Image (cartoon, coloured by chain):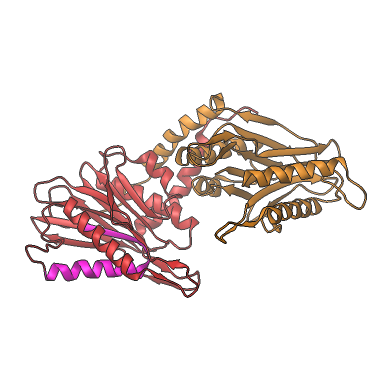
Chain colours: A orange, B red
């Protein structure tokens, strides 16, 4: 499994992903699932991946190869004119990789190696944009009513996101919110785990902002994880009693 | 979908279930999923169901028919000597109904109408016991380390249960906890909905205790639902800032 969240704020975009990859519970690895590209002063992009690791690694490799060999007729993530075109390129690449690896097993069962992606960033003078890209290659964009995307194990960490998200929050508060959401998820699902990869993209900076690998021993992570249980219990006990 | 939780407390057992049944999002009905039996002074049982409605209704009907026609060699829920034997009987009935309705579709695809159950209660001088019964007919029992069971849409409402559960809590606090857990679930999953059915079984009372159908307009339910969002936001903002 995986857990990644991309948040759209008035100040920019925030991305947090876990790094656990597993093939069964007895085969666990750490793989980066958050990837970034920038042309300082001109564009900045961040991609997070959930799903089959062979598929997502192939997508990132193909995007990187294209960056090295882009032409005017075949642009790359570093040359496409808009975030919409970037999402389309990533979606087409994803769809292509999935189609190529699709096969029928010996018994005739179809086998597909799917993946779902979150892509966000800013190009030139356009506003920052955030997309969720499906295995079919199509995608939806975040907007006021749906200002964040989750992929992977989305359920445990959703209630706090829905209730505490505020588009005007500063980056430190947004990171705190994501840490709380990840804490609930990691405690409940063994296949989501630290370290976490954080990336902030500040609006109009047009370069990669603050990033951090958050280890299990990270003091902020430990603090949030420890204090959140107490805060949640206190919030619960602050509710008035029901009548029986 | 469905959401049911059974809690084991020092004071007894608490059960809460939703009532929404759906076949697609355009075909929604209200069906009771919480069933009780008692022989006052001797035994009391509560069963909650998740899964295929035809299966769970057949299981309850068969259990009720058996109550009317029990013999010494074929006991019923009203005559079995222990909660373990009650769980075994319910599990065997469930397994039988599933086996009988299992079929192959015209194209050869196997089709199974599964269900999962929570059974709790108390018989005679034994302690109250709580079981989760699987479609295979076998079952596990709640114990100190795992003092509650959830069936159906379990993920959204789990983080608060895990953190705020305390075996010494009184019934009113336990009901409040379950209402918070259900609120998170109902807000996130359209296929879980009010009214809710509540049943309390007090230890050693050996009769059905407090029960209540909680409608959407129920003042306690509305209060918890409204205040919990604020309490959760306050809890979040009470956390210290992280450093960026």
Extreme front residue here? Answer: A106
Is residue B65 on the magenta stretch?
yes
Give the answer, above or below, for where A103 lies relative to A209: below
Q: Residue at x 18, y 47 (%)?
A: B128
User: Residue B170: x, y in percent?
Assistant: 25, 44
Is B65 positioned to the left or the right of A211 in the image? left
> Can the viewer see residue A21?
yes
Residue B189 is left or right of residue B8, and the answer is right
Q: Main secondary structure of the magenta part?
A: helix
Query: Is residue B32 visible from the viewing direction of this image?
Result: no
Q: How many marks?
A: 0
What range is drawn magenta here? Answer: B46-69
Q: The N terminus of chain A is located in which quarter?
A: top right
Residue placed most toward the observer, A105 or B132: A105
Q: Is residue B71 magenta?
A: no
- The residue drawn where x is 40% and y is 37% is A234
The x, y position of residue B108, in whole percent, is 47, 70
- Taking the view exactly as shown, the residue that stands out farthest to the right is A72
- Which is nearer the eye, A110 or B70? A110
Q: Position of residue B6 (x, y in %)?
A: 30, 51
For this view, does B36 lie left or right of residue B217? left
Q: Residue A112: name its quadrant.
A: bottom right
Could you tell me which quadrant the C terminus of chain A lies in? bottom left
Look at 58% across and 56% down and name the residue there.
Answer: A105
How far across and how far down the image is residue A172, in percent?
Answer: 63, 34
């Amino acid at each position: 499994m995986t857990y990644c969240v991309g948040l759209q704020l008035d100040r920019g975009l925030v991305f947090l992903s876990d790094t656990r990859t597993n093939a069964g519970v007895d085969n666990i690895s750490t793989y980066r699932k958050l990837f970034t590209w920038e042309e300082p002063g001109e564009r900045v992009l961040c991609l997070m991946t959930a799903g089959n690791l062979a598929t997502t690694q192939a997508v990132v490799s193909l995007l990187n190869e294209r960056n090295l060999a882009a032409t005017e007729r075949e642009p790359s993530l570093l040359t496409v004119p808009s975030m919409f075109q970037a999402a389309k390129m990533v979606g087409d690449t994803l769809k292509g990789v999935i189609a190529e690896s699709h096969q029928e097993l010996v018994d005739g069962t179809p086998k597909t190696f799917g993946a779902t992606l979150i892509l966000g960033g800013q190009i030139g003078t356009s506003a920052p944009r955030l997309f969720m890209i499906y295995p079919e290659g199509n995608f939806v964009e975040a907007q006021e009513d749906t200002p964040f995307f989750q992929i992977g194990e989305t359920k445990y960490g959703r209630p706090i996101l829905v209730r505490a998200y505020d588009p005007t929050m500063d980056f430190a508060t947004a990171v705190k919110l994501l840490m709380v959401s990840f804490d609930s998820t990691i405690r409940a699902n063994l296949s989501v785990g630290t370290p976490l990869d954080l990336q902030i993209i500040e609006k109009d900076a047009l370069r990669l902002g603050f990033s951090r690998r958050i280890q299990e021993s990270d003091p902020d992570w430990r603090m949030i994880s420890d204090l959140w249980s107490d805060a949640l219990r206190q919030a619960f006990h602050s509710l008035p009693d029901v009548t029986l």
